[in-house]
Amino acid sequence: GSRKCYEAMTRLFELQDIERNRSENTREYLAEINTYFRHLNRETTEMTRLYEDARYGDRVDAVQLERMRELYRQIFQRLAEQPGTNVP
Protein backbone atom coordinates (compact mmCIF):
# COMPACT_ATOMS: atom_id res chain seq x y z
CA GLY A 1 0.00 0.00 0.00
CA SER A 2 1.86 3.02 1.28
CA ARG A 3 5.27 1.63 0.38
CA LYS A 4 4.19 1.00 -3.21
CA CYS A 5 2.86 4.56 -3.51
CA TYR A 6 6.06 6.05 -2.12
CA GLU A 7 8.25 3.86 -4.33
CA ALA A 8 6.17 4.83 -7.37
CA MET A 9 6.88 8.47 -6.54
CA THR A 10 10.61 7.76 -6.25
CA ARG A 11 10.53 6.08 -9.69
CA LEU A 12 9.02 9.24 -11.17
CA PHE A 13 11.93 11.24 -9.83
CA GLU A 14 14.45 8.62 -10.95
CA LEU A 15 13.20 9.37 -14.45
CA GLN A 16 14.22 12.98 -13.76
CA ASP A 17 17.72 11.78 -12.71
CA ILE A 18 17.03 12.23 -9.00
CA GLU A 19 17.77 8.85 -7.48
CA ARG A 20 17.38 8.07 -3.82
CA ASN A 21 20.67 6.83 -2.42
CA ARG A 22 20.44 3.92 -0.02
CA SER A 23 22.07 6.06 2.65
CA GLU A 24 19.48 8.86 2.30
CA ASN A 25 16.56 8.97 4.65
CA THR A 26 13.15 10.13 3.44
CA ARG A 27 13.67 13.71 4.61
CA GLU A 28 17.02 14.02 2.86
CA TYR A 29 15.50 12.69 -0.33
CA LEU A 30 12.57 15.08 0.01
CA ALA A 31 14.99 18.01 0.34
CA GLU A 32 16.78 16.88 -2.82
CA ILE A 33 13.52 16.59 -4.78
CA ASN A 34 12.37 20.01 -3.63
CA THR A 35 15.66 21.58 -4.67
CA TYR A 36 14.75 20.83 -8.29
CA PHE A 37 10.96 20.73 -8.16
CA ARG A 38 9.89 23.43 -5.71
CA HIS A 39 6.47 23.63 -7.33
CA LEU A 40 5.82 20.07 -6.04
CA ASN A 41 6.76 20.84 -2.44
CA ARG A 42 3.24 20.49 -1.05
CA GLU A 43 2.57 17.13 -2.73
CA THR A 44 5.97 15.56 -2.08
CA THR A 45 6.02 16.72 1.55
CA GLU A 46 2.58 15.27 2.24
CA MET A 47 3.43 12.02 0.45
CA THR A 48 6.60 11.67 2.51
CA ARG A 49 4.76 12.43 5.77
CA LEU A 50 2.08 9.83 5.03
CA TYR A 51 4.74 7.26 4.15
CA GLU A 52 6.65 7.98 7.36
CA ASP A 53 3.43 7.71 9.37
CA ALA A 54 2.82 4.28 7.88
CA ARG A 55 6.39 3.10 8.23
CA TYR A 56 7.16 4.34 11.72
CA GLY A 57 3.74 4.58 13.27
CA ASP A 58 0.37 3.02 12.88
CA ARG A 59 -0.78 1.40 9.71
CA VAL A 60 -2.22 3.64 7.04
CA ASP A 61 -5.98 3.43 6.77
CA ALA A 62 -7.91 3.36 3.51
CA VAL A 63 -8.45 7.14 3.50
CA GLN A 64 -4.73 7.84 3.91
CA LEU A 65 -3.81 5.30 1.25
CA GLU A 66 -6.27 6.85 -1.18
CA ARG A 67 -4.73 10.25 -0.41
CA MET A 68 -1.29 8.87 -1.27
CA ARG A 69 -2.64 7.59 -4.58
CA GLU A 70 -4.18 10.99 -5.28
CA LEU A 71 -0.89 12.73 -4.47
CA TYR A 72 0.96 10.36 -6.81
CA ARG A 73 -1.45 11.21 -9.62
CA GLN A 74 -1.00 14.92 -8.96
CA ILE A 75 2.79 14.64 -8.99
CA PHE A 76 2.67 12.57 -12.18
CA GLN A 77 0.36 15.07 -13.89
CA ARG A 78 2.36 18.12 -12.85
CA LEU A 79 5.62 16.52 -14.02
CA ALA A 80 4.00 15.59 -17.34
CA GLU A 81 2.90 19.19 -17.84
CA GLN A 82 6.39 20.55 -17.23
CA PRO A 83 8.51 20.90 -20.38
CA GLY A 84 11.70 18.86 -20.41
CA THR A 85 10.66 16.21 -17.92
CA ASN A 86 10.69 12.48 -18.56
CA VAL A 87 7.30 10.99 -17.76
CA PRO A 88 6.12 7.79 -19.41
Image (tube, grey):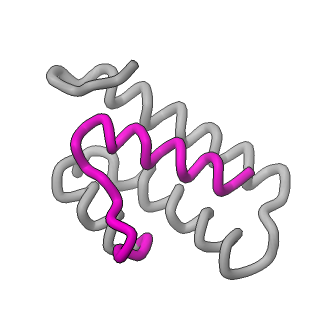
Q: Which residue sits at x=33%, y=65%?
A: 21
Q: Measured along the vertical axis of the image, is residue 80 above or below residue 26?
A: above
Q: Which residue sits at x=55%, y=52%?
A: 6
Q: Residue 56 appears at what percent x and percent y?
A: 67, 80
Q: Measured along the vertical axis of the image, is residue 87 above or below residue 22?
A: above
Q: Residue 8 appears at what percent x and percent y?
A: 53, 42
- Residue lying farthest to the front in this orientation: 22
Q: Residue 62 appears at what percent x and percent y?
A: 84, 50
On the picture, is 51 further left or further right than 28?
right
Q: Residue 28 appears at what percent x and percent y?
A: 32, 73
Q: Which residue sits at x=43%, y=70%?
A: 26
Task: Indicate yes or no whether the magenta region holds residue 31.
Answer: no
Q: Measured along the vertical axis of the image, is residue 55 above or below residue 62?
A: below
- Judging depth in this view, the residue of 5 and 40 nearest the camera is 5
Q: Which residue sits at x=22%, y=43%?
A: 17
- Residues rendered magenta in the picture: 1-26
The quarter of the picture where residue 51 lies is bottom right
On the picture, is 73 further left or further right than 23?
right
> For the C terminus, which image quadrant?
top left
The quarter of the picture where residue 11 lies is top left
On the picture, is 12 further left or further right than 66?
left
How many numbered marks have been drawn onto this rendered protein structure? Answer: 0
